Image (cartoon, rainbow, N blue to C red):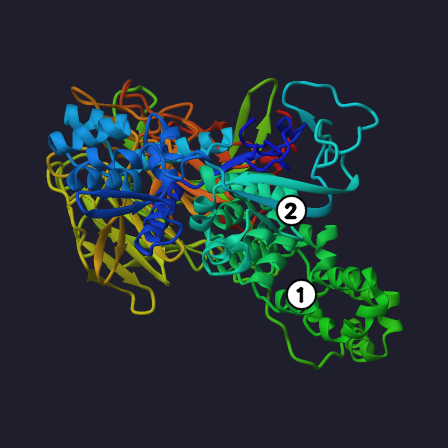
Amino acid sequence: MQDAWRTFRPHLHEEAVHSEAFVPKDSDLLWYVLPSHPQSLFSRLQALREEGLLLDCTFDVQGSIFRAHRLLLAASSQTPQMFFPCKQNPQSEAEETSHCLTPLGLRAALKFAYCGQVDLGGEEVLDTCQHLNFERLREKCKSGVTTSAEKETAKTLENIKNMWDRGEGCDITIRAETGESYPGEYTSLKGTPRPSDPPQAQTTQNPAAPEWRKRDEVIKKVFFFAAHRLVLAAGGDYFRALLCGGLRESREDVVWLRGISGWVLESILHFFYTGRLWLDWSRIWELTTALLQFQLEGALSLCTDFLRERMDEGSCADVLVLAETHGLVQLGQAAEEYVLTHFQKVSAEESFRAVPLVLLSRLLQKDSLCVESEMEVFRAVVSWVEDQPEDRLPSLPDLLRHVRTPLLSRSELQEALHCPLLHRSPGARGAVEALKSLAKGSYRGPECGPRTPNQTVQHLPVQVLALVGGDTVDDDFMKRVPSRTVWSAQRFHRGPGLIRAIEWKCVTNIPEPARFRHCVCLLNSKLYVLGGRKYYGSLDVLKSAMRFDVLQKKWEELPDMLRQRDYFSAVCLGGRIYVLGGSWDYSQCLNEVESYRPEENSWRMDHPLDTAVCGHAAAVLEGQIYISGGCDSHHRCLPIMCGYDPVRGCFPRAPMSVGAGRAGHAMLVLGSRLVVTGGLQPLCPGFGDQLLCEVYDPQSDSWSSFPALPRPHLSPGATVHDGRLYVVGGSSADTARDSKWVHCYDPKKGCWENLGAMPFPYTDLAVCFLPSPDPPVKINSFLNESFSTK
């Protein structure tokens, strides 16, 4: 923490100041890490070397000239001081050893410093390592055991960061001068109590005074930050142009960045050296704006991840405005979807009143805007106009055109007619007349369709957790019994302590036969049930498919799939359903992929997978299908991760990092990432439960840790709703017992929570969220801790 938020860095310049590190008091700061940052930074450092920019170290080796950056060589050496010359001698100690080096050895050293790659050379490389004190490279060469280039560059970057902490090799000072209110109350890391009246803020005229910050305290401050010119130039295009483009700043030791807060500049510098950002709501807006200004895409991706994952009713409107203003397309889509889905609550928030007119008009036109009554849309318009009546009253008539007044009830029409705002706007007379004619029953204007495809005269159905099929042990524990039941969760109870319970209701029964190891998909408010098994015989694998109209409560038989499948995966993309892989007996896996086109009511084969696999998982993220893990026909558990295109086939991505493989698991979308959870892992001998989870970031093609499951879930049902992950049922590979538990991961809480038990301990089931025409108690009431006690 000290390294993360040190307010002033030591610097070679005599004006630089020193102070304690400070961290927010009672804050909800979270680390956000970009795993690909070291590789990206070193790629840009190598580009600077190839273009001959900022090179400050020269080796004359046997008539050949090698030029490099002192900072990278120092960070790769056990004695970094030997690469920095003193005032009396412009040549460093390392450069003076040029006559001891060879071209082969120096090339290997430079390749290691810039790329993290190890060439297992002979004596020439070892001699160069000895003269330059490249101990890490020397150990690799002597042992013959190499690590990945990614790990070596990460280690080198860590050394650079440690040198930055010590002020070693810093050759530039960045100044930020602002009148600012620091976000949040701060206290010294060493525990110095915060006084009631803060002392004078530290400045260059008062370098000994401790730095205190208080919310809403606006003081003119001058911030100094020591840094390495090379790291700044590699950190982003803005700084590269500033320091390498021939501008005045490229020749100065002190560079002023006006109009940027000191803490924002500190955050940017810390990201350059670590790939990390501290984020919370008090700083996200100003920091995101600065990252957009400086065109720092890597750091910006962390901010957009934060905004997407932690968005709520009070912030989604601000996120949408930010995304629209700066052209952040994917973030804007996520924010707009959130606003539309939670419009009734969002429109009551203060941030909603700051939405621009053009954006508000666009939202009101959407069919997918979710409200229990169109009166909520009318009230939102009135509330928005009343916030700034002088400026916004002329816009009222245009906004009222987007309110679907024919959907209002008689009492709602009377409420609208008694709204004083309508009678203050001359342009709203037409809307008033339309309301009067609707109230009298004489309306002859155009009819309006419902707001969403799910809306009926009973209003918008609630989304409920549904269990589909699976199998369990009978009451006498004598045999396994496949299920035909579709259960829905009606009410969630909290009892004393950690006791949880769920009330379940039977929605319908799947037409014969019962099935398990099947898949379900929800497309256009219809539930598709595909394949699976009816029992455990070699001929019991199914290829039948059926469709359930949730609102009409009617089943429809569909054409059979082209192949029998169990332990397969299915996803929806572009209005089609894709089924991928699976097995058709106990020893043969499939690499075949087929898709169902509802408009044609038929199945077609698509490009096959690279590997025949079963027990894998698939998910769709930002229009791309991803496939993880599974077992091959030799029962080997795979760690693979790949993208899949129905026309071009698979393209490999970074393999999973936890364990030697995973199968019988789930993969779920969380924001812009994919979470892999549950299943089993290969052991020696056999298989065991895998409780560890991990999360995949497609942008950086890398994996990172994720909170572990509290209980085993092998072959569970899994789904996502409202930004939360649900893993349901399954079994344990270690105990061979079925699980009855429903676990939920809420990003705001950062942990898995047991919501209660299923009606029976089902395994090999499927789950999803269905629209319910008979609204139960919403699941959100449980998760937001508005409980009923049983």
Looking at the image, which residue is at 73% across and 41% down? 221
Front-most of 617 and 602? 617
Front-most of 341 and 42? 42
Residue 540 visible to an observer of this rendering: yes
Label 2: how many residues lie within 10 Å, few (<14), some (14-19) or many (20+)? many
- Find residue 372 and report its horizontal and vertical position in percent: 66, 55
- Would you identify the image quadrant in which residue 595 lies? bottom left
Q: Residue 360 carries which label?
A: 1
- Would you identify the image quadrant in which residue 767 lies? top left
Q: Which mark is residue 176?
A: 2
Looking at the image, which residue is at 45% across and 42% down? 466
Mark 2 or 1 closer to N-term? 2
Q: Nearer the viewer, mark 2 or mark 1?
A: 2
- Mark 2 in CB contact with mark 1 (< 8 angstroms): no
Q: Residue 578 carries which label?
A: none
Name the secondary structure under disc 2: strand
Amino acid type at image mark 2 = Ala
- Find residue 79 and report its horizontal and vertical position in percent: 35, 26
Q: How far apart are labels 2 and 1 at the CA level? A: 37 Å
- Find residue 534 and report its horizontal and vertical position in percent: 23, 40
- Find residue 631 and report its horizontal and vertical position in percent: 19, 37
Quarter in which the C terminus is drawn: top right
Amino acid type at image mark 1 = Leu
Front-most of 479 and 644? 644
**Side of 633 relative to 745 (left or right):** left
**Side of 109 relative to 354 (left or right):** left
Residue farthest to the front, as pictured: 88
Q: Is residue 162 above or below residue 567?
A: above
Quarter in which the N terminus is drawn: top right
